[in-house]
Amino acid sequence: MVSSAVAFCPGHISGYFTRVEGDSVETTGSTGAGIVISEGVRATVMKADEPSVEIRRTNAHNHEIARISGSKILESVMARLGVCAAVTTECRLPLEAGFGLSAAALLAGITALDALHGLGLGSREIIRLAHETEIRHRSGLGDVAACQGGGLECRPFAGIHADITRFLDVPGVIATVTLGTLETSSVIGSPGAMARVADAYPGRCPTDIFDFFRLSRQFAEHSGLIAPGVRGILHACDSAGVPASMTMLGNGVFAYGDTAAAVLSPYGNVAVMTVARSGVRMLEVTS
């Protein structure tokens, strides 16, 4: 009998997107492009009599810097599956900052719950359940679909079963800096914001990482989502010749290349990561 299970899911930074209302939850979501990143969420689940969720944020040395009790989205999943567990999620990136961590927590959490309770869901059902939960809670649109695998990804069609183009061999580092939180639901629940996003959408996949940053920056400019603090950081990146754009949807900047971290460092704590080569996966099962 399994006593605990651990799974990991990488996060995701959207460069550009547009919302798509499908004829079902499975076909509702977004089209667009983004980067599946090496940083993400590690979920540990253990047998328990009552469901509970603890969210831990740690630093680079794995020292806890913040703890939050409770998660509506993970608790709703356990209720739907009819299972109980003590769930602990761990991440090093800030929450509600455009890193797709709600999707990563769902995918890692459900994957681990499936192993803990022997549910036999399989990857397809895990992805469907995570995506449906994101849509219903307005915590994301396309992150679950993106985090099925790694790479610089492009989703020309919405939903979890549409073909996704992935560039897996993307060298170099991604550096990010976050100025604060931005609640995703406040943007995707706004008809006005979504109309501006739709008008700014480039309508094609990038040809490489540099084209991705060009399209992402054009989208950020035309969507009207750039905050004043973000604007100043983007100007600094432009002056240094560093490809950069605003994290979608987050109050921060992500940039590419060996000098990106140095350019971002005056503006806050910089996180450096790479492009992930794979998506959600099991790490450990203990009997």
Image: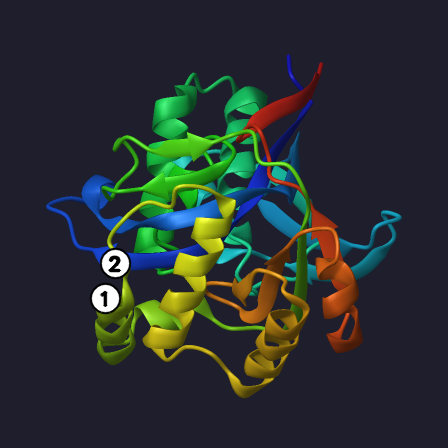
Q: Which mark is drawn over residue 102? A: none
For the point 35% across and 27% down, the residue is 125
Residue that numbered label 2 is attached to? 19
Residue 182, x across and y down, in percent? 51, 73
Which quadrant of the figure has residue 64?
bottom right
What x and y, as percent, mark residue 237?
63, 70
Q: From this view, report whether residue 180 is shown above or below residue 12.
A: below
Q: Are marks 1 and 2 in contact (CB under 8 Å)?
A: yes
> Residue drawn at (36%, 33%), measured in percent from left and top?
165
Residue at the (64%, 34%) spot, across then down: 45
Closer to us: 119 or 98 = 98
Q: Amino acid at mark 1?
A: Ala
Q: Which is more N-terminal, label 2 or label 1?
A: 2
Residue type beneath disc 2: Arg
Taking depth in this image into account, of 30 and 67 the one nearest to the observer is 30
* Position of 38 relative to 260 (above/below): above
